[in-house]
Image (tube, rainbow, N blue to C red):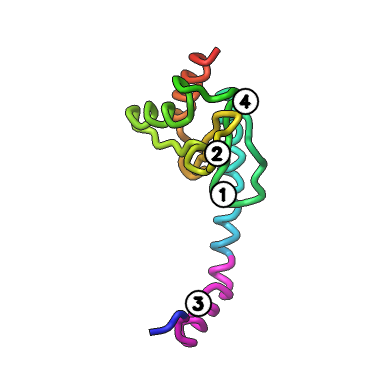
Amino acid sequence: TGLTTSEINERAVYHAISARPYKRMIEKLVDQLRNARERTTERLLDAGMAPVAKPRGGMFVSGGWDIAPTAKFNGKLIADRALKAGILLSPNEFFMLRESDSIWFRFNVAYAADAPLLTDFLKTVRKEMA
């Protein structure tokens, strides 16, 4: 057994990803992700959330509310409540070793870009915080 793949596998992968049809497919995917990131960011802003950072690429956007979590109101509790409503959220507690000064979530743009149920849920949570 070894830790690397055979040369023939590596050559096949190289050929596949350097072929023109594959490049077009990747370019289309990059455009779709960019558009989805933009739509997701708009939806989060509409729900009163602010982006944690502006991603330069990829399939995730992080956004949240600039309020300190409490024992009665935090990302984990909101995610548990969302799950009961059929929405899967990834709260900041999943990605940090120490407590955060705010409540934020990581959103998959393929889902969040066109999910009115998610936006409505986040708006309801925001109203409860006020």
**Circle 2 sits on which residue?**
98
Q: Regarding mark 1 in the picture, which secondary structure is present there?
A: helix
**Circle 4 sits on which residue?**
66
Visible residue check, residue 7: yes
Q: Is residue 63 above or below residue 34?
A: above
Bin the neighbour count of mark 2 within 10 Å (Cα to Cα): few under 14, some 14-19, many 20 and up: few
Labelled disc at residue 13: 3
Task: Inspect the image, locate mark 2, and give the three-letter code of the amino acid beneath it.
Answer: Arg
Task: Inspect the image, locate mark 4, and give the three-letter code of the amino acid beneath it.
Answer: Asp
Residue at far top of view: 130
CB-based contact (under 8 Å), mark 4 and mark 2: no
Specify the quadrant of the image occupied by residue 87: top left
Identify the residue at image location x=62%, y=25%: 66
Q: Which residues are magenta?
A: 4-23
Visible residue check, residue 117: no
Identify the residue at image location x=52%, y=37%: 92
